[in-house]
Image (tube, rainbow, N blue to C red):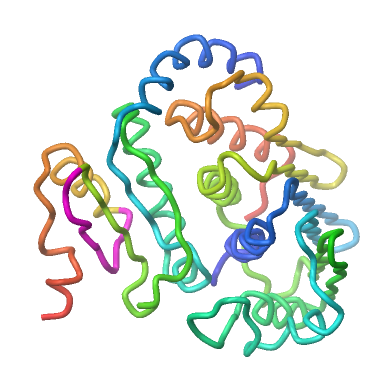
Amino acid sequence: MKSIADLEKIRQKTLSAVNLRRESEGTRIVVGMATCGIAAGARPVMNAFIDEIGKRNMLNVVVAQTGCIGMCRYEPIVEVTLPGQEKVTYVHVKPEMVARIVSEHVVNGNPVVEYTIGAAEK
Amino acid sequence: MNELSLYILDLVQNSISAGAKLVEIRIVVSRGEDRITVLIQDDGCGMTPEFLKRAVSPFTTTRTTRKVGLGIPMIKELCELCQGSFEIESQVGVGTALHLSFRLSNIDLPPMGNLVETMLTLVNGAPEKPEFLLEYAVDGDSFEFDTRQIRQALGGVPLDTPEVLIWMRDYLQEGIEAAGKLP
């Protein structure tokens, strides 16, 4: 059973790492979370990213949210930006696709081309 | 949208956009009365009486990029479809409260769905402000989730730290199941 008291342990363990996280420029994963994104299934996608990043304990990755990106037909949309690189836009993202995006793109730096907007528009 | 918890996620985003410091989400289920009530209350910027009148129209939005906003009209339609009621109170500078109710046994009522994911998405999306208070009660058994309490226990560790989010997921899951999970 989880209790608030567990947080003290987490605090001691992560405080130093968190300070490090603030200083370093990290990767940003942004999920569209407006009405259109939510209706298209963005919430489980968002949570799959939280899970995957949590499992790997990647403190240099921020999973953030944004409103409507303006391409509702492509939702759920996820934008991944690695430090110093151009933004990559993934469209029609499903939770099953998340592990691959994290391992191939976020960890190893190779975008999953077949999931990107460029591939979808062809 | 096919889960009540998705509508809640969508509506609370409005409170965040309104600059709220505290958002209260109170879900009370009474099987005896065959009713679910949901209150979403914030202390955000509020709406003028004129804007409030138009808020239920799908052609009202604060966005400047397009002319439609479907969050409020969709929930109003769902409340009415499910033999419930829909009310908004709002005052500029004070905040907004949405009072929703549904008949629990209504065939058109979507399942509650994954309320844990809804809360995690909210906290992760706005880890600094606002604070969230979730009250979830089923026939008198209730569970409370309060980010103020969690933030205090964490000292300076942000709420969107991966390990904290994973802890929150389990904490929410256990609390909601103990109070009585809905389908």
Q: Identify the image quadrant of residue B16.
A: bottom right
Horizontal side of A117 relative to A32 (left or right) equals: left
Decide whether the magenta segment is chiefly helix, strand or loop: loop
Residue B138: image location, x then y, percent? 80, 47
Taking B117 as reference, is A68 above or below it?
below
Q: Nearer the viewer, residue B146 or A60?
A: A60
Q: Position of residue A47 (x, y in %)?
A: 43, 47
The residue stretch that appears in magenta: A84-95
Q: Quadrant of residue B137?
A: top right
Q: Is residue A83 above or below residue B78?
A: above
The count of marks equals 0
State which quarter of the image contains the N terminus of chain B: bottom right
- Determine if residue A3 is in view: yes
Is residue B41 magenta-colored?
no
The residue positioned 72% from the left and 35% from the top of the image is B146
Measured along the vertical axis of the image, is residue A20 above or below residue B170?
Answer: above
Q: Judge whether residue A90 is colored magenta.
A: yes
Give coordinates of residue B143: x percent, y percent. 76, 37
